[in-house]
C-alpha cells in the first residue's frame, strides 16, 4: 500500500501554522525525532549514565540505518557534526604537492569553494568550471581534468539553482583517472536516492538538518574502504584503539586503529542527535525511499508549474540536469528577496538565493501547500 501522507503530516507541528516549502534551508524536525532525543535524556538520569557503552551500540544500529540511504555498509559510515568536518578530514589527509589541481563547479556551496581557495594558497591550482547561463556540460567539465588533478568537489544538487549533475558519469570518468571524488549530499539525501558505489565516490557527506529533518549538529559521512586504508584520522581519542569498549582497562601506548569509518569520529558523540537521526531514518525507511523520491519529485513538478504560470523563468524549461526538489525561478525585474519576505507575510515559507526564488518541498508537503503558494503569488 502507498504511504498515508496525510498521517505523516501529523509528525510536523510547523505545518499547523505555516506553509513550509523551505527544506533546502532547514528541514522541520518531526515529533518522533524530538521524542527520541528526550528519551535519551531521561535515560541518562534514570540509569545514572552507567549504560553509556550501550549508547554506542544504539549508535551502531543508526549507522546501519544510515548506510541504507546510500547502499553502503555500516562500516563505511561515520557520524559528523557537519559536512565541513568530513571535507576537512579528506583535504587535510591528502599529501598535496605544488601544482596539484582541485576542480569544482562555479557557484558551488561555499564549503567546497573555500576549501579550493585555501588549497590554492598552499600551492595547488583551483579551477572552477563554468556553467554559462546555468548550462552544465559534461564535456566541458571533463576537459578541466588533467593529469595533475587530485580532487573534485561537487554537490549532488546545487543549493541555489537546483542543478543536479550526472554524478555516475562524472564519478566513472574520475575513477578511471585516479582522481578523488568528494560529494556533498546535504541538498538531496533524504529526498533522492543515492548509491555510493554507482557514483564512484571516495567520500560522501551530508548534514542532517535539511532533507534528513534532524536537529543541527548531526550528519553522516561515507568513507570508501580503499580510502580508509590511507587516510589517517584528523584527531585521536580514547576510541582510537580497536578495543576502546573495554573502558575498565583502556589501552595505553600506540593505538591499533579500527578499520571501519568510525575511527575518524573522535570520542563522545552527539547522542541526542544520533537518536533523533535514528528516529527519522526509521520513519523514512518505513515510508520507503523510492516512495519518498516519487512524492518529492511529484511536488517539485507542481512547484515548477506554479512558478512558471506566475511568470518565472525556470532553468529546467530549457536545460537538462534540473530535475531536483530544489525549484528555482527568476522573475524579471523583481527583487526575489522582497518577494520571499512578502510570501512569509502570508505564512508561506520559501527562500531567495542568488536571484532565484527557491521552493523546496519535501514528502510531508501536499498539493494543498502548493495551491497556497499559487494563491499567495497571485495575490502579490
Image (cartoon, helix red, strand yellow):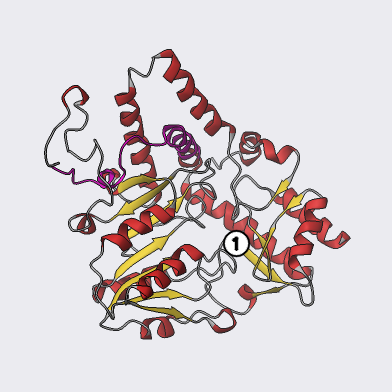
Q: Quadrant of residue 325?
A: bottom right
Label 1 environment density (alpha carbons within 10 Å; few <14, some 14–19, many ≥20): many
Tell me what residue is drawn at x 22 percent, y 57 percent. Answer: 231
Residue 368 seen from this side = yes
**Position of the C terminus by quadrant:** bottom right
Left or right relative to 215: residue 256? left
Q: Is residue 134 above or below residue 219?
A: below
Q: Residue at x 23, y 59 (%)?
A: 227
| Residue 257 shown in magenta | yes
Number of numbered discs on residues = 1
In the image, 213: left or right of 7?
A: left
In terms of depth relative to the viewer, which is nearer, 43 or 98? 98
Query: To which residue does mark 1 refer?
Result: 326
Note whether residue 155 is visible: no
Numbered disc 1: secondary structure: loop
- As drawn, the residue found furthest toward the front would be 121
Q: Residue at x 25, y 44 (%)?
A: 236
Q: Quadrant of residue 256?
A: top left
Picture layout, residue 285 above or below residue 331: above
The magenta-colored residue range is 256-283
Counting from the top left corner in percent of width and height, residue 28 is at 61, 43
At 52% from the left edge and 72% from the top edge, which residue is drawn?
A: 321
Vertical position of residue 293 compared to residue 162: above or below:
above
| Image x and y of residue 154, in percent | 43, 67
- Quadrant containing the N terminus is top right
Amino acid at each position: 500500500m502507498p504511504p498515508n501522507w496525510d498521517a505523516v503530516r501529523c509528525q510536523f507541528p510547523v505545518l499547523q501554522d505555516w506553509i513550509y516549502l523551505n527544506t533546502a534551508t532547514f528541514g522541520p524536525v518531526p515529533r518522533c525525532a524530538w521524542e527520541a532525543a528526550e528519551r535519551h535524556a531521561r535515560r541518562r538520569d534514570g540509569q545514572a549514565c552507567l549504560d553509556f557503552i550501550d549508547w554506542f551500540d544504539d549508535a551502531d544500529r543508526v549507522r546501519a540505518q544510515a548506510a541504507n540511504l546510500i547502499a553502503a555498509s555500516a562500516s563505511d559510515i561515520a557520524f559528523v557534526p557537519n559536512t565541513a568536518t568530513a571535507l576537512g578530514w579528506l583535504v587535510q589527509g591528502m599529501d598535496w604537492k605544488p601544482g596539484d589541481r582541485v576542480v569544482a563547479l562555479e557557484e558551488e556551496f561555499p564549503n567546497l569553494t573555500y576549501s579550493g581557495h585555501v588549497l590554492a594558497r598552499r600551492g595547488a591550482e583551483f579551477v572552477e568550471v563554468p556553467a554559462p547561463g546555468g548550462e552544465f556540460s559534461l564535456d566541458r567539465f571533463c576537459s578541466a581534468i588533467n593529469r595533475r588533478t587530485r580532487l573534485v568537489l561537487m554537490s549532488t544538487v546545487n543549493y541555489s539553482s537546483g542543478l543536479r549533475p550526472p554524478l555516475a558519469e562524472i564519478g566513472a570518468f574520475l575513477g578511471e583517472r585516479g582522481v578523488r571524488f568528494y560529494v556533498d549530499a546535504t541538498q538531496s539525501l533524504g529526498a533522492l536516492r543515492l548509491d555510493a558505489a554507482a557514483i564512484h565516490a571516495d567520500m560522501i557527506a551530508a548534514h542532517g538538518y535539511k532533507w534528513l529533518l534532524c536537529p543541527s549538529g548531526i550528519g553522516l559521512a561515507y568513507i570508501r574502504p580503499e580510502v580508509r586504508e590511507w587516510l589517517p584520522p584528523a584527531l585521536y581519542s580514547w576510541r582510537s584503539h580497536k578495543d576502546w569498549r573495554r573502558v575498565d582497562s583502556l589501552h595505553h601506548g600506540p593505538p591499533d586503529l579500527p578499520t571501519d569509518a568510525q575511527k575518524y569520529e573522535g570520542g563522545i558523540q552527539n547522542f541526542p542527535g544520533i537518536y533523533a537521526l535514528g528516529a527519522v531514518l526509521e520513519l523514512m525507511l518505513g515510508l520507503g525511499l523510492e516512495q519518498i523520491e516519487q512524492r518529492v519529485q511529484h511536488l517539485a513538478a507542481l512547484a515548477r508549474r506554479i512558478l512558471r504560470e506566475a511568470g518565472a523563468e525556470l532553468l529546467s524549461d530549457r536545460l537538462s540536469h534540473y530535475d531536483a526538489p530544489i525549484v528555482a525561478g527568476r522573475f524579471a525585474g523583481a527583487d526575489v528577496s522582497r518577494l520571499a519576505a512578502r510570501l512569509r507575510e502570508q505564512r508561506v515559507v520559501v527562500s531567495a538565493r542568488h536571484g532565484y526564488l527557491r521552493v523546496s518541498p519535501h514528502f510531508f508537503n501536499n498539493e494543498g501547500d502548493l495551491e497556497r503558494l499559487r494563491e499567495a503569488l497571485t495575490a502579490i
